[in-house]
Amino acid sequence: MTTSQTTPPVRRTKQRAAIRELVAATDEFRTAQQVHDDLRLRGESVGLATVYRALQSMAESGELDAVRQPEGEIAYRACAAREHHHHLICRTCGRTVEISASEVESWADRVARQHGFSDAGHELELYGLCSDCAD
């Protein structure tokens, strides 16, 4: 006997709406702690665990991009692009540019096939200094 599992529908809560609105209002990647702090400054009563769960859920659904920062923490940002893409991120100010990298895509596919892998995925984020911060 097999049982089928269905994903429960995402609850539309006031807290989730506040998180969505805050993340949509910035172009920078923000950590869960930063989002939580910003919400508290706006007078929103949202627990840190709720922020973590909501951001992770929104990233899993494709609503947000998630990147691992050099320090190891995950940061989130709303992105208009639904297709696979990468980011160039300023280490100083956080300015982010969405980039396509067809050469990287071709290379990753080729390397995976050479080693007998299929359906391989990858994550690539480039960090540097934007022209404003480099001056």
Image: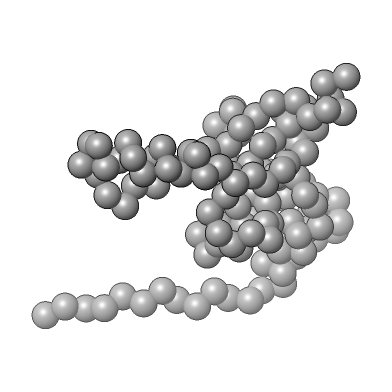
- Image location of residue 119, percent across then percent down: 31, 52
Quadrant that contains the C terminus: top right
Q: Quadrant of residue 63?
A: bottom right
Res. 101 in view: yes
Task: Name the residue nearer the viewer: 67 or 84.
Answer: 84
Q: Please, which residue is most extreme toward the left here?
A: 1
- Image location of residue 2, percent across then percent down: 16, 78
Q: Is residue 9 left or right of residue 39?
A: left
Residue at (77, 49) in percent of width and height:
27
Residue at (68, 57) in percent of width and height:
78
Quadrant that contains the N terminus: bottom left
- Image location of residue 60, percent across then percent down: 50, 59
Res. 47 in view: no
Task: Name the residue nearer the viewer: 99 or 24.
Answer: 99
- Image location of residue 80, percent across then percent down: 68, 61
Residue at (52, 44) in percent of width and height:
102
Is 130 rendered above or below residue 22? Answer: above
Q: Name the colouring of the figure.
A: one colour
Q: Is residue 57 left or right of residue 19?
A: left
Numbered-mark total: 0
Residue at (58, 36) in percent of width and height:
125
Is 66 rendered above or below residue 124? Answer: below
